[in-house]
Amino acid sequence: MRDGRPNLVFLMTDHQRADSLGMVQSGVEVTPNLNRLAERGTIFQRAYNTCPLCVPARTALATGKYPTTNGVITNDWKGRAAKDHTTLHELLHQHGFEVGHVGVNHVRVRPALEERLPFAHWEDGKGYAAYLRSSDAEDSSFDRTQFQTPVVENHGTQSVECRYSSTRTAVWPGPAEDFKDLFWCRQAVDFVKRKRDKPFALFLCLWAPHPPLRVPEPYASLFDPDKLDLPSNVGCPCEGEPKIYRKGVPAQLADGVSPEEWRRVWAAHLGLVNLADTGIGHVLDAGLEIGGQDDTLIVFTADHGEHLGQHGMYQKMEMYEQAIRVPLVFAGAGIAGQAVREPVSHLDVMPTLLELLGIQCPDDLDGVTLASTLQKSVKPPQRPVFVQYSGNPVVGDIRRCVISEGYKYVWAPPDCRELYDVEADPLEMTNLAASAKHQDILRRLHEECRKWGVKHADAEFGGGT
């Protein structure tokens, strides 16, 4: 342990559901390495992201601020709305950590993340592209459009035809070790094993299990589709679902997919989850080799989940648990072994890590520290947790969500409302918004949304531009 402080290994996947941890399908443990990590650390069973979309979710994590606060509310790939917000990476560097980033970079700030500090290692795909061209895994015949579905998407004032990754599955033609995520995990292992005289912070951001669902062997055949135990609401919209949701991208992507196809989708998705878990296991083993479990603080999460056919939807971009509830595990360096049921937010990760690493937390962050929960098993504070969605490439479909008092409330302007008793109805199959006996809680949670919107510069509540 350099200068008495632990190292940090921050692990993130893309599209990984919270319920994948601890899951066994067709007789196979889906995430054996992450399960062992969770067993010796703290797993937050009701952790929520800030937006069911890659760039807003990851930028919120990196800045500790809601998308409406940091300005990145859509998949703003070019960073047009990006602003100058201090990131977790910068604070770690300023306090003496050697910082490395391996994998996808979906954080949008200005200046760009890679320009904000001298990274000890930076790989966001260019190295992998060069490696792939020089390997036998190069697949020049791959046609991405064959793994996409055309949809009609709301772009605010107009409907636009777009293409999104579809439910089509296939075997990736190269050897598994040449697959992007396992290449990145090897780079992460090399970074962890470097000799150094100060603590390091590694951010490993994997692509898996993000579609397209092209999976290398042996992972492509790991889960037998016919032996999978799928949720009962695969292919089934909920009672009282707002009619506009069938016009949304997730519902269009799921339209016409048969039960047999959903089984193949699940098998491919779980194969990619297991592949990511395998690579993560190599990184965790490397961390133990250099010091031990008290020498390194480990965090694992995902940017968002994946519907996988539940509610008759595919991908993310709606407020059901499958899309907005994320895995969140802290382990090592004095972290208690426990499972926490109280709702927490992705925004709590940054202030928590800063306190655990002895770094003063900026006073403008939107989350709260969970350090006392991790170290002393103190329950997290009871408070509403908020999630927002404003469209994918540009502002379009609007959803606002609050989780509180055992309920989830979703508002889709101008007048579509959902209310779910997430304790009694965990699959969210009965929308209680029209129930007479639930009108008080409906009004209270809408008011919570309104107050949050005004405070956090949300244009839907008159708080922004």
Image (cartoon, grey):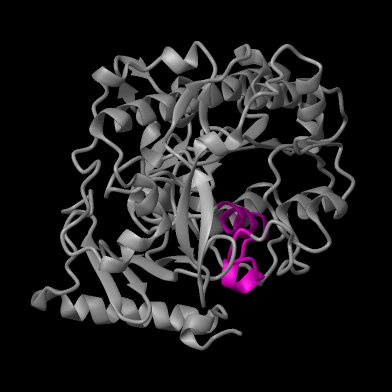
Q: Is residue 73 left or right of residue 267?
A: right
Report whether residue 384 is seen. Answer: no
* Residue lying at 45% horizontally and 22% vertically, measured from the top left: 271
Which image quarter holds the C terminus?
bottom right
As drawn, 6 above or below 429: above
Image coords of residue 257 (percent x, y)? 30, 39
One can see residue 337 in this view: yes
Residue at x 33% of width, y 55% of height: 320
| 360 and 133: which is toward the camera | 133
Q: Where is residue 241? Give x, y as percent.
A: 23, 63
**Is residue 117 shown above or below 166?**
below
Res 27 → quadrant: top left
Quadrant housing the N terminus: top right
Against 460, residue 97 (above or below) is above
Please give the name of the residue rendered at 19% of the width and 80% of the height, measured from the top-left corner. 440
> Residue 309, image x and y in percent?
31, 42
Residue found at the far left of this picture: 436
Task: Provide the major secondary structure of the magenta segment.
Answer: helix
Part of the protein shown in magenta? 54-75
Based on the picture, tell me whether residue 14 belongs to the magenta stretch.
Answer: no
Residue 172 image position (x, y, % from top left): 56, 19
